[in-house]
Each structure stands twice: as C-alpha cells, then as structure tokens.
Amino acid sequence: MYGMPPEMSGAGYDTSMLQLTGYLFAGLVVLILGAIALAVLTLPAFFVILYVSDKLVGVFATATGWFPLKVTVIMFRGLRRSMLRTSLTYLALFVLTLVLCLIYAVLYMIGNATSEKEANFKAIVTHKTTIPSQMPPGYYERFKRVCLEDLPPEMRPKNGDKDIMSWSFILGTTDKANPRKDNMVFLFALEPDKVLTMMDGLDELVGQEKELLEKACAAMKANPRAIVMSKSRLKSLNLRVGQTIKLHGMNYANLLFEFEIIGELPEGKYEGVSFMNKDYLIQQIDTFPTSPNNPKKGEQHPMADKCINLIWVRLPTKEAFETLSEKVNNRAEFGTVPIKLETASSGIGTWLGAFKDIFWGIKFILVPAMIGIMSLVVANALSISVRERRTEMAVLKVLGFAPRHVLLIVLGEALLVGFLGGGMSALMAWGLLGNVKFQIMFFGAFFVPMNALFYGPALGMAVSFAGCIGPAMAAKNVKVAEVFARVA
C-alpha cells in the first residue's frame, strides 16, 4: 500500500515485476506438484468410493429392477474396467480443481478487500500528491475533531474516537552495519486499544486468539516499549516472546528502538508485520534533539513533521463519507499539507494497481487455458475409451438400449469422475489447505471460501462435460452392423 517507507524497495521487500512474475510462476509449479501428490494420495479413496457406490447401487437395482439404476451400475463398472485411464482423468480433474480453488481464494479475498461494505464503511486519509503518504502529526488530532465535532451527529463515527486510528510505518534492522531482509522488522506504530476494533481481520477474532491479543494490546498500552510480532518474523529472527530486541531505524534514521516482545499476532494475520505503541515513536521523535544519536545537536528529527502515514476512520454511511470528504478538502482546515479522503477499498485497489496485469492474466489467460487443457485431456481419454468399447456399445444396442442410453452412459461416467475429482479436491482445499500462506505485503493468509465446496464439483463436472460430449456423441452413433461386420 502506498505510504510504505521508500527504504523497503532498497531492502528487497519491493521486488521488481519481473521477479514477482518469477516468484508466482515458481509458486504455481510448486502448487501443481503438490496437487499431483495429493491427487495420488487420494486415488485409493476415489476407487473405494466407486466400489462402495457400485455395490450399493447394484443392490438397489436388483431389489427394485429400476432401469436407471441398472444404467448407473454400468457407469460404475465402466469406470472400474479401465483403472489406468480413469485414474489419469481423475488426477487431471483433481489437480485442475485444486489449483483453481486456491487461485479463487486469492482473487476472492482481494475482491472482497476492494469492495465497498456499507455496514463496515471505512475511509482512509493520505497525502494528496506524495507517495509514500506522509502527514504532520497535528493532522490526526485535527481530523478527529472534524469527525467528532464538525460532522452532523448522525454522520459521526458510532463509537467515537474508537473508530478513528492512525498508522505510522517503521522499518528497522537489528544490524545497522549490514541490514538484510532476515534482520529487518517492519512495524505499524498505532494505538493499541484500537487494534481489535479497527484492524481488518483482527476485529473478527473469537475465543483464545481474541483473548490473547486483548492482553497483548493492554500490555502495549501500559508499556510503550512493548511490541507484538507475527510468528513468521519471530521465527526469522530466532526470537521468542519475553525477549528484548533493539532496532535501528531505517526510514527513521538515527532512532534506536528498544522493544520487549510481549506477544504474537494470530496465525495468518498480518504476516511479517509487528505492532508497536505510537506513543513510543512520538517520544523518540520528541527527545531526538537532545539524543546522543543526533548528528546535528538541537535539531529536530527530519520525520518530525511527517510521521503519520495513514489515518483510518469508520463511518456509518456513504453520505457521511461524502460530507467528510468535503471538509477534508477544505484548505482552511488542512492547508499546510494537501490530503485526500478515499474509501478503504479504493485505496487498496490503487495499491494493487501494480498487480492488475498479473491478476488479469490469471483470470482471463491462465484459468481458461488450464480448463481448456484439462478438457482436452478428458476428451482424449474418453475418445480412446469409446473406440475400445465400440463392441460393448453395439451389444448394448442389440440388448435394447436406445442411442440416448448409450449417450447417457458415456456422459454419466465422465460426470461421475468430474464430480468426485472436483468434490474431493475442493474438500481438500477447503479443509486441509484452507489457510494458504501466500502473502502480498501485509495481507496475511488467504482462505478458501466455503462456496468452493459447491464450485469444485460443478467445475469438475463442467470440464468433464466439455471434454466428453464429443466422444459421447460418437458412442451414441455407433452402427451395430459395422461393428459386428468388423468382428466377423
């Protein structure tokens, strides 16, 4: 997001688009290989389901004599007749559905983050022309006064001051002489008592995770030097809760922060990020003129007048946002540094603009290409199967099966594999791989939504149908006389 310190690009966090493309490609390869491994592991379960279903349907078909059940038994036994071909079709559909479920999880979360939410309408204040956004600290108090006093009562934040918070970004390193990615810490300097009400993803915590974070925020409020870190950053630094850490400021040059680690962020939330008390940052800036680290004794820190990066506010309605936006644009109130107010979704969308070509390529090139390739795989497998079973199709017609019955048998076999392959992969993605550790800046984990349990089987069946409709039509049109003439 804009507002990030510029030093992050030099430190290796802001990779080039070429590098990012390479990372995504490598990640996709790893994802596909992992999906193939999972598909192989679930293959025995797939055939067990086929066998059990075959026996159950066979029992009901024998007991009732119902013709559709007999056709279904033929479908199950047709799939078990060519185990290798059925396995390859299942593997292809499983891998396709699993990969697309995980891609869908990323796109779903990004789409959700960039959509307006009337019930939780957030707006963001940034510098109007400068990236990264940097605003005077006095703007925060002035903005709060405008929100809480100048807005009409029905348009003010419902929870008052609790619905307004600021972020200041700090990049520090434990080794000033040799800063590297593995010894850096990226922090949000904020108000601890607003973490659980204003931070997306943390305002929905329940149970023990919420209780532990509440205690950590209370400790940060009482002790300005307290810090809460993500588990991944603690592991990278080889640190534990209870230890202390010294950080040399990079975007806040010549500031030395001494922190006590008092807690961890919940798993998958703000990975790679740490939270600190904003009061400690202000204290360090205020005492900098007399600090021994100040190379120009008596002068204030260069960041003293631009230490606020973002201001967040939760508003009751979009009308309140429009009214507040007019007041923010009032040069009489905010004339020193021009600022702008935009919806949170718009701000996140602007930040993600650098990735829009990659997301477009994933949605409209990669996904259709994968679906097309898998449809061809299914079509090829079923075409071979139909050619091998021409005699069987002819015998079925001799026994009284109509062409439409033969068509339904071939279609049904493909749709069964598509349903089971898509369903099992979607269930695997949702249940076991629901927390995808793919991170973009401070976006944490990407969760596979529950509706993937519907889309997975539907996608598997759709791809199977697209791939098998041609071979099914060919099976339907098998000529009995031609087949037996060749046999003779």
Image (tube, rainbow, N blue to C red):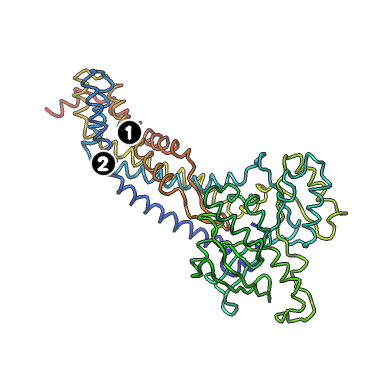
Q: Position of residue 221 (x, y in %)?
A: 66, 61
Q: Left or right of 174: which side holds 160?
A: right
User: What amino acid is found at the position of numbered circle 2 in the picture?
Assistant: Arg
Residue at 65% across, 41% down: 117
Please tell me how many numbered marks the rendered image carries: 2
Which residue is nearer to you in this view: 24 or 207?
207
Q: Earlier in the sequence, mark 1 or mark 2?
A: 2
- Going by the numbered disc 1, the residue's amino acid type is Leu
In space, the residues marked 1 and 2 are separated at their CA atoms by 14 Å
From the viewer's perspective, is 227 left or right of 315?
Answer: left
Task: Tell me what residue is drawn at x 26 percent, y 24 percent.
Answer: 71
Residue 436, given in percent of the width and then of the height, sits at: 47, 52
* Residue occupied by mark 2: 85
Image vertical order of residue 313 relative to residue 225, above or below = above
| SS at badge 1 | helix
Tell us which disc is closer to us: 1 or 2.
Answer: 1
Q: Are marks 1 and 2 in contact (CB under 8 Å)?
A: no
Residue 135 placed where, x, y %?
A: 76, 61
Is the residue marked by circle 2 packed among few (<14), some (14-19), or many (20+) residues within 10 Å? some
300 lies above or below 414: below
- Residue annotated with mark 1: 416
Q: Splitting the image into 4 quarters, where does residue 1 fall?
A: bottom right
Instruction: Residue 271: give x, y in percent of width and height.
Output: 54, 58
